[in-house]
Structure formats: structure tokens, C-alpha cells
Image (tube, helix red, strand yellow):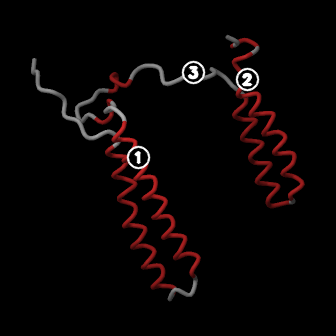
Amino acid sequence: MSTKPKRQRPPMFTETLVFLALVPFFAIVAVVYGQLTGYAEPVGFVGVLMLGGLAGLTGFFLWMTGRRIDPRPEDSLTGNIAEGAGDYGEFSPHSWWPLVLGIAAAIVFLGVAVGWWVCVFGVVLGIIGLVGLIFEFSRGQHAH
């Protein structure tokens, strides 16, 4: 058996690389878009440039986070799936509260399109759903 250590990339290397590679791509797309429209439609040009900035912001965040954490099993080029086994958190086995929150968000967005008064119902339902999700483990079958 070989005692050669596993080769590892820096933590979160792949994710960082993907987002940082999008920055020059969106910059080039923005310039091409601006040239094709003659810069007469500035919203698209600025929007694509801002999309590149958002990708850069996400890539920078992942790079900084990768410097602070230990290497994960998926960062190893020779890693196995079993190395990532274990608990990732405590989740309810069958919670309905995320569905309630999704419906509340849909009602709020519907209110933006139809009328602001509809948003009130979505916000009230969202507060109910959020309280239910937060206190789900405080009562009933999963209380502890």
C-alpha cells in the first residue's frame, strides 16, 4: 500500500474558478452587446457588466472562504464519496413550512404585479410560515 499523501487543491478551488472565469466572459459579452446596439440601449450593457461584477463578488467570497476553511473531501483529486459522509445538519423529515413560505413569496410577487394590497396577505402568511419553521422542533412529534 502506498503511503503517498492524497493530492489536494486549495479549498473551494473549482467553485472559485468557475465564478472568476465568468467575469471576463461577461465583460466581453457586455462590450459586444454594446457594440451591436451602438450603446443606444444602456440598460442591457450596464446590466451585463453588473452581472460580471456579481460573478466576481461571488468568486471573491468563495476564494476568501476557501482560505479560511480546511480542505474538504471534494477538494481532493483522489477523494471518495464516502469521505464526505456524516451529518450536515438537523432537518425535519417532512416539514410543510417551506411550502408555506414558498406560497407566501409567490403571493408577495403576485402583489407586486396585481396590487400592493395583495402583498399584505403574502407578508402575513410569510410571518406565520417563518414562525412555524423556526419553532417546528419546539412542539409536537419532533420536540426536544
Residue 132 higher or lower than 34, as above or below: above
Kindly identify the residue that appears in the image at 11 percent across and 21 percent down: 3
| Residue on which the image places disc 1 | 62
Residue 43 higher or lower than 72, as above or below: below
Q: Quadrant of residue 116?
A: bottom right
**Mark 2 belongs to which amino acid?**
Phe
Closer to the eye: label 3 or 2? 2
Horizontal side, residue 87 vs residue 118: left or right = left
x and y, in percent, of residue 72 in the image:
34, 31
Q: Which SS class for mark 1?
A: helix
| Residue on which the image places disc 3 | 90
x and y, in percent, of residue 111 in the image:
82, 55
The label number, if any, that marks residue 135 in the structure image? 2
Q: Between disc 1 and disc 2, whose residue precedes? A: 1
**Mark 3 belongs to which amino acid?**
Glu
x and y, in percent, of residue 24 in the image:
36, 67
Q: What crowding class fits label 2: few (fewer than 14 Cα within 10 Å), some (14-19), or many (20 or more)?
A: few
Q: What crowding class fits label 3: few (fewer than 14 Cα within 10 Å), some (14-19), or many (20 or more)?
A: few
